[in-house]
Image: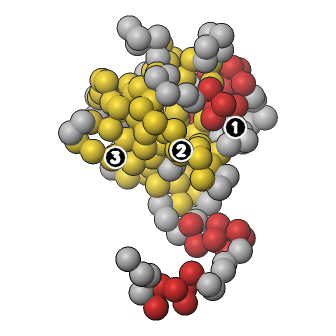
Amino acid sequence: MAMPETLMNLAHAPTGPARFRQGMRCLVGSVNVIALQGLEGSLFGVTATAVCSLSAEPPSLIACVNLKSRLSEALRPGAGFSVNVLATDQQKIAQAFGGQTGVAGVARFAFGEWHRSEHDIPLLAGARASFECRVAEISDFGSHRTAFGLVTDVHLGDGTSGSLVFGDGRYGAVA
């Protein structure tokens, strides 16, 4: 199928990374921490807003992480990982896992209360929701790796807090 002429014209009008980032700052996203235990038992975690539902049948989601992150190296087919949807009072956790505090690696897990699921997947206490997943497929594109996760369990928070969001370079809250 041929691309419509209007899209062909757009496809040849490149935009630079700086302009793209400026536009994407207008897109408000839920703040999440993606966490997993690597093959050697090491813990990995990163803050991400590029997470969304994929399908209800089977329950699945996609999570995108920068290829430069150590977590992206640990994502492999069959690996278990969690997506922890942060509550409004968990901004310091978002900042730690987002590299904004100077804390790196496993030391980031000192922020927040973490426990392991029965499948050894790290879960954040107090999160609005935590999704336990298994990597079904991996796809790399540009600067990011996308993990297609089959959701094996969902842990819901107590519902007393709103969700932490990020947009226009700032954290905010949605009740």
Q: Tell me the number on the disc at residue 53.
A: 3
Between marks 1 and 3, how big is the CA–CA gap?
A: 22 Å
Residue 26 in picture, x, y percent from top left = 53, 69
Q: Residue at x 42, y 81 (%)?
A: 2
Dot 2, how many residues are within 10 Å of its Cα: few (below 14), some (14-19), or many (20+)? few
Residue 105 in picture, x, y percent from top left = 72, 24
Between marks 2 and 3, how big is the CA–CA gap?
A: 16 Å
Residue 97 visible in the displayed image: no
Between marks 2 and 1, how big is the CA–CA gap?
A: 15 Å
Name which of mark 1 and mark 3 comes first in the sequence. Answer: 3
Question: Which marked residue is nearer to the observer: mark 2 or mark 3?
Answer: 2
What amino acid type should be assigned to the residue bearing mark 2?
A: Ser
Q: Furthest residue to the right?
A: 102
Asked if residue 124 is positioned above or below residue 30 in the image, the reply reads above
The quarter holding residue 4 reads bottom left
Check disc 2 and report its element: helix, strand or loop. strand
Residue 30 in picture, x, y percent from top left = 44, 49
Q: Decide: marks 1, 3 in contact (CB < 8 A)?
A: no
Q: Residue at x 64, y 67 (%)?
A: 21
Q: Furthest residue to the left?
A: 57
Check disc 1 and report its element: helix, strand or loop. loop
Q: Decide: marks 2, 3 in contact (CB < 8 A)?
A: no
Residue 125 visible in the displayed image: yes
Asked if residue 66 is positioned above or below residue 89 in the image, the reply reads below
Residue 106 in picture, x, y percent from top left = 69, 20
Dot 1, how many residues are within 10 Å of its Cα: few (below 14), some (14-19), or many (20+)? some
27 horizontally vs 103: left or right: left
Q: Which residue is mark 2?
A: 139
What amino acid type should be assigned to the residue bearing mark 3?
A: Ser
Q: Which residue is mark 1?
A: 69
